[in-house]
Amino acid sequence: MPSSVNDRFRMIMIGAGRIASQSHLPAVLACEGVDLVAIVDSTPGRAAKLAREYGLSVQIFSDLEPALERADGAIVATPNDTHHEIATRCLMRGVHVLVEKPLTSTYAEALTLSELARNTGFRAMVGYVTRHRRNVRLMKTLLDQKHFGRVSDFAYQFGTIGGWAPLAGYKSDAGGRGAGVLAISASHFLDRMLWFWGYPLDMTYLDDGSKGPEANCVAKFQFEGGMRGTLRCSKSASLPGGLVLDTEMGRVVLPEVEDADIVLFPNENQHLQYVLKPRNQHASPDREPFLAQISDFVSACKTGGGFGCDFNQGAASMRLIEDLYSRRQPLMQDWYSSLDSGDSR
Amino acid sequence: MRVAVVGASGFAGFAVVEHLLEKGIETVPLVGSTGNSWRLFSQGITPQLVNVLHPEGLSRALGGCTHVVNCLRGNENVMLQGTRNLVKEALRAGATRFVHVSSVAVYGDRPAPGAAVESAMPSVEKGTYGWIKLRQDEIVQRIAARGLKSIILCPPNIAGPGSYFLLEILGCLLRGELLLADGGRCVCSTVDVRNLAHACFLALSEGSTTGERYFVTDDERVTWASIVDGLRAAGQIVARPPECTLDELRRTSEEPAEPKPRLWVSVKHLVSSDVRSALRKDPLLAKIDGALRAFLAGLGSQVEDRFRLAIEGPIKVPRKPGDAKMNVGLSAQQLRGVWHRCDKAKVELGYRPICTFAQSMAAFSRWLQSTRGMLEPDWSSRKILFGYSEAEKESVHQHI
């Protein structure tokens, strides 16, 4: 455990799959003051292969225990049904932990982890990485300051054709719940939504996962104070990603792009748009979000604070996802409904 | 009957799987990536992952399959080597029929009028999509000669819910990038994806199996105007596309002739500032470049200026671009001018389209409006993310 902010922080990577290889590992290696000391993966050869790819001479383990002895903090990037057990072992051994989203595979598990983190006092965060985008942080600040006045409605959408494979790294129930587009893509926005506005009062939910993980989903929310919002995500159609707010000042748009600006289209002038940027951009340099996430996590471990998603908030996300799935209604898919059932015209 | 559908996650492949399952046929969906297989998974259909470049895996996947439908997509190597492996392994596995989904693109981007029927001679430019599809056809025809009963289906532009062809036109209409020629009177051969899937089903048991081609279309004389009008209505696009004559479109789409190699031009490229700046990244070459520049400077500013002018040429000011960049490749499809007929498929396969063009466009519209939530109250907020307001401003003023 580092005794001062200047001590090097010893990190271990648990899980050597795609998200570890493409995102977490480069971020750890780029992070000032952090040393990667070990990679752990239960699949033989995978951790060593990852280390070779990056030219690292770190220790390789297939078992977690010996790696924990060497660690101040751990990144858990394993399938979601293993998160509960691994994060528990980390916290019990006094190791701070950053768990890839979703926190667990059930809300009940998330609650027990959240309680454990509170009791042990170690830092426990969930990898909702989009919180660490510069523009998302700015949006949070502006909303907290009520910069745009009252927000009456919000609409969010994000859709790509394909991408992360369904079920890859996600455990689902027999009907595919927990491994579809809601858990994989929409959960990032759900975390931000909870961060911005808290838990909704009411919601409806539709998806097309009649027999497996859903590829399309639509959710509608009602919040305290009358604010309403919609979310629409797809893995089979392209939907330019972004959040649109209807506010007292006008319409506010934040595209789902790392370096996009927040744009306000003011009500009082139909010919202007205002681009919103922080004044002190030099004081807080723009970092790649995974690097920003690791920096935030390490800083929180050393000195407290941080604006990553803690386990309490991660549990709220799990509750919301379960809440939505429990209200599932089928999404219309019968595009040819006007056709005759016969084979000829 | 046990049918392997290769490329089952694609637009056509998924429709074939759905149609065969509806017909109660045992279907084995084969995919190259589960990341693109969301629609299959959401319907509870678990595909088999297979790399068509690895014959061993392919052999296992095709085991027990009596029929193969090939909807393979990918790069040139995947499409050609993959098809070679596929036909070889299908023959080895004892498949009794191979249905290959090709394309009318094998008759080229500007097909001869005779290409209205299958008996025309295919003709394509090397390296184009049509060229790859033609090479695939030849692979299938060779295996047919070696005993694997094979049939080649040639769809034109594939329409229907999620159609990439229609989405591309829609995007161009939104951005004002489509030139509509001759008042939209040009013919456009289309086939709804369900019609194509139905033809694949028929081809499993009907038709000549010596590797002959069959055109599969909607069997309707569809014009570009009807497509554009349908898409404008579906996409709620107010602006009309800019129009031009056929001659203007021909001139716009003519590619400039490739420059002939000339030694002096090549030398000029070699010593141009762009190339030198790349070479200067190497410390030794940077030193040599520095020494040469110092030598040139020593000859006096007039000599240096003349030399620079000889190498770089005079300063060029590009003409101010127009308000919107046209999608010439897509617009030029109106010059195809051939309406492919599906009479042969009707006679020999018993093919009748199960869906009219109007029904197909209605299904696309329903899909588009539902997927994008265009009939929901929040559409007015979200439409800005699709670029609606900007596109409409641009398109309204676009005329050539």
Image: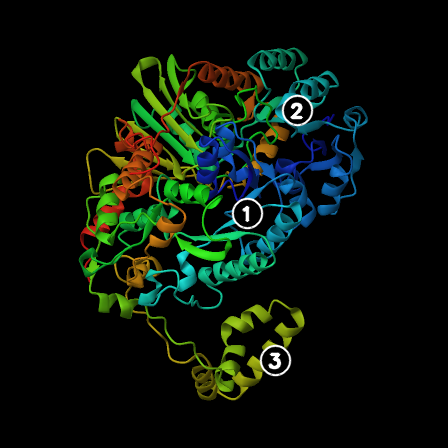
Q: How far apart are marks 1 and 3 (CA)?
A: 70 Å
Q: Residue B40: image x %, image y %?
A: 50, 33
Compare residues B294 and B348 and report the one nearer the observer.
Answer: B348
User: Which mark is drawn over residue A18?
Assistant: none
The answer to whether B256 appears left or right of B85 in the picture is: left
What whole-number distance in Å separates the C-alpha atoms at marks 3 and 2?
Answer: 57 Å
Give the distance between the C-alpha atoms of the residues marked 1 and 2, in whole angstroms: 56 Å
x 47%, y 57%: residue: B212
In this rendering, the answer to whether A115 lies above or below B132 is above
Q: Which of A248 and B89 is in front in this view?
A: B89
Residue toward you, A133 or A59: A59
Find disc 2 in the rendering and name its residue: A97
Give the residue pinned by disc 1.
B97
Under mark 1, the amino acid is Arg
Residue count near mark 2 (Cα–Cα under 10 Å), binned few <14, some 14–19, many ≥20: many
- Residue at horizontal 37 percent and vertical 17 percent from the top: A204
**Do the CB atoms of the residues marked 1 and 3 lie less than 8 Å apart?**
no
